[in-house]
Image (cartoon, helix red, strand yellow):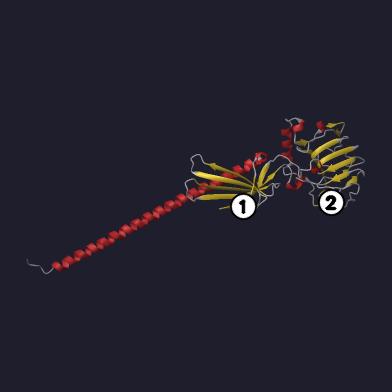
Amino acid sequence: MRLTPCSFPNRQIGSANLLIALVLSMSITLVTLAVAKTQLTEQRISANSHWHTQLSLEARSRWSDAVANLTDNFESLDWSPTAGSEELVNRSTFTTSDHSMLSSVMLLRDPPLSRYFDVHATSSRDDGSRLSASYNQAVRILTVLAPQAESPPPLILNGCLISASSRSDIRPLNSDTDYAGTAAWLSGAQPCRPLSAFEFHAGQVDERSLSQSLWSNVFSVSTEAFAALAEADLSLPAADRRYWLAGPANFANSRWTQSLGSAERPVALYFSAEVECPRFSDGVVIFGVVFIDNSCSDPIADVRMEIFGSLIVNGDLNAGTANLQLNHIQIADDNLMQLEFPILRSVKVPGSWRDF
């Protein structure tokens, strides 16, 4: 066979072209794989982001439900001790209707008598993956009373004592012991003579900066909200009413004659500024707080009056010659350290938030 002079160069060109084609093909394949991998990663990131958002929303929702349950069913919740601690814990678990998410909620209470609770909610995918989100924040449950007034001294006076009988007694928490609590809060805004007419039973008298209205020092709700609570209670039998707003219908011959409450069911009795300082009939016994939004220039009682809780006067007090007995609620029941009212709501504790 006769070879032409250009056969070898043509064969070399063909081999080079084939090599270039293979390199290009491999490059395209690698680029395609890289793009596919990037798209898959982005899809996973997007899916994880979606699930993180859903889990975060679920955790917050379960947290809100737990706080609502704490507020509405506080008395019926079951608490278990934690190992090596005084903390009490309440645990519960939930699954979404489509079984895609599993949530756990934990309430921590420390110490057992505290009204502060750490509420932890964690939601995760119910598929064995590690995707999860948590929302944790402490809350404080509130009754009609402000926190500092849940265990108030027997007397809170935003004025001066005009007169009192030597037979009058103030018995604070742990009275007549070395651990006696505060017997009275007094406003230091004006000079008053000492409350020497009272026997304090080892308690102390504290001067405090009491606001002119005094209301916010004692109650966690507004006067309007309290009036609404009292109006709602009007439909209940007198023995079941917890909130009382005194009005003309409650007086007999200008006297308050009703004994109210019990150690287990204290009441909050409010005499508004529109109502003059009441005069209590002989033998009236009230368990709870009596708030008088007026000065009592006339004697508050004729012969004897007894309160287990606190007498609060937004002004001067004239106890007259009556035997006035003001006692911490513990005097009625040794096991009571504070006034037990129904839980109205929960509030978040600032600075306790964690979300991760």
Q: Residues within 10 Å of mark 2 (few under 14, many from 20)?
A: some
Mark 2 to mark 1 CA distance (whole Å)? 37 Å
Residue at 45% across / 51% down in the picture?
A: 46
Residue 130 on image: x %, y %: 49, 51
Farthest residue to the front: give it.
Answer: 83
Q: Are marks 2 and 1 in contact (CB under 8 Å)?
A: no
Three-letter amino acid code at disc 1?
A: Trp
Q: Is residue 136 left or right of residue 206?
A: left
Query: Is 3 left or right of 203, judged from the image as shown?
Result: left
Snapshot quadrant of residue 278? top right
Q: Is residue 186 above or below residue 306?
A: below
Sequence-wise first label, 2 or 1: 2
Dividing the picture into quadrants, the one containing residue 327 is top right
Q: Nearer the viewer, residue 277 or 262?
A: 262
Extreme-left residue of the structure: 1
Residue type beneath disc 2: Gln
Query: Mark on residue 104?
Result: none
Task: Between label 2 and label 1, give the one nearer the viewer.
Answer: 2
Tag 1: Cα neighbours inside 10 Å, few (<14), some, or many (≥20)?
Answer: some
Q: Residue at point 74% right, 37% down?
A: 227
Which label belongs to residue 204? 2
Farthest bottom residue?
5
Quarter of the picture holding the N terminus: bottom left
The residue under label 1 is: 353
Query: Measured from the top left, where is residue 169 in percent x and y?
Result: 88, 44
Q: Would residue 73 be found to the left or right of residue 146 on screen? A: left
Check disc 2 and report its element: helix, strand or loop.
Answer: strand
- Is any atom of residue 292 visible in this view? no
Residue at horizontal 17 percent and vertical 65 percent from the top: 11
Q: Is residue 102 visible?
A: yes
- Viewer-side residue, 289 vs 264: 264
